[in-house]
Amino acid sequence: MATNSPPIEAIRKIPPHVHSSSPFVQALMSAKAMMKFQRASQLITSSLDLEMLLERVVNDIADSIGCVEVSVWLRDPNGEEMVLNGVRGCTTYRKGSRLKIGERGMVGHVAATGVTRYAPDVTIDSYYLACELDTRSELTVPLMTCGEVIGVLCVDHQQANAFSDDEVLVLEALAGHIAVAIENARLFRNERLEREQMKREAAEARAVQQALFVKAVPLVCGFAFETAWNPAGSVAGDWFDLIDLGNELTGIVLADVSGKGMPAALLMSSTRAILRSLAKLDPSPGRTLMQLNQMLMEDFPTGKFVTMIYAVLDAQSREITIASAGHLRPLLINGECSFLDIDTGMPLGLGSTSYPEYKLTLHPGTQLLFYTDGITEAMNHVDEEYGAARLVQHFLQPSACVEGLIEEVQRFSHKSNHTDDATAVLIRSR
């Protein structure tokens, strides 16, 4: 490969042949041609689709100056090659063709040096790589952003000495617009791919979470369970669980992990797994919460916590034993509604504490509701909370159910910017 070729400044001093009378020059320097270039640069920078952008580049330039061949080569980020991404008027190369940077042709040379190269007569240029038989002059301009060559714009013409100094400057200026447009299109494409990947991952995470909840509800003689789970986003930090503990005992869990989205969902999954491993070791919900709290304190990130109601229902005695880790008071429904006045320990993961137990007999016809703050703290468009009073009013209706509750909360908070996960478990004693 030759290394002593004259710089662009020296090459431009080669006396032009018929520059002043060239139809190309006359067309380019006319007001109409300049308007075409201005329009081309505006259209180019307005496109965020990379393939469409490059098609527009080669076609608009070719249409504006009437040359026989225009191509755009982009640097392969994974190698030392230039890849043809846009072309018009070439029969030798196709999209996807590659040239070694610094080794092959004017394109490879300009990609290596970052300096415009103009060959007024391609037959005597040591770097020119033959393409079309009737090509007589070639202008190759680097596409640069932040001082780095990201591509090369190559314009060929059938006429020798087809480009004047002013015309080279115009095409170099246009190359600057093209380089910016390419970078913008790449950023947009990368962001779009990242968003699509995040959507796929969120959908998969939601499916995993739903699989945890969509399972058979334990059959407990004399009791029925209703559950509702409505995440504010793709995944949730709220969760519920019904655990068969054997000997006619059923563990009933409702919890709310601090935060939202994927971080809360991850903490939810780990908390659920740990609780399930502990639940069958001790029938006492208070002691189970103490053990769970100790384990979460070791593993939870600083500032993260879980509020939880954990109850154990004895179907034989109809007695339910409840322990609360900073959670909302359960609602007892028995002709009238009242919130249980139970003592509570700190939310899980914040510090050592005990969890007092509250015992209650669920006589036939009695209902007990566990719920998360995404229900009572749901806000409407004027920042008014759904509140405890509306919760009571809902369950004073004979047809009240948790799915209806969630629908009512959704209607109430329609058009509100404040949304949260909403989950409820209703125990019906029959």
Image (cartoon, rainbow, N blue to C red):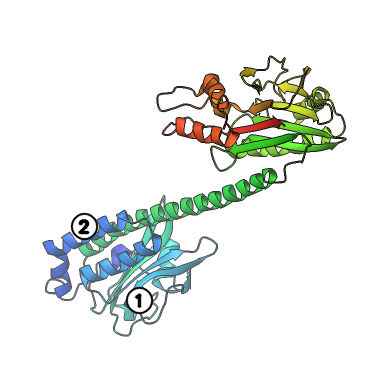
Residue 340: give x, y in percent of width and height. 68, 17
Q: Position of residue 155 (x, y in %)?
A: 30, 70
Q: Nearer the viewer, mark 1 or mark 2?
A: 2
Res. 4 visible in picture: no
In which quadrant will I find the C terminus? top right
Above or below, 240 against 343 in this view is: below
> Which sits in the foreground, 276 or 78?
276
Q: Give the answer, above or below, for where 250 lies relative to 348.
A: below
Using the image, determine if residue 273 lies above or below residue 317. below
Q: Identify the residue under disc 2.
A: 38
* Element marked by disc 1: loop
User: Residue 295, percent across and down?
Assistant: 79, 29
Q: Tell me the crowding category of disc 2: few under 14, some 14 to 19, or many 20 or more residues within 10 angstroms, Cα based.
A: few
The numbered mark at residue 125 is 1
Q: Relative to 245, is 132 on the left or the right?
A: left
Mark 1 → mark 2, Cα distance in angstroms: 31 Å
Q: Secondary structure at mark 2?
A: helix
Q: Nearer the viewer, residue 409 or 110?
A: 409
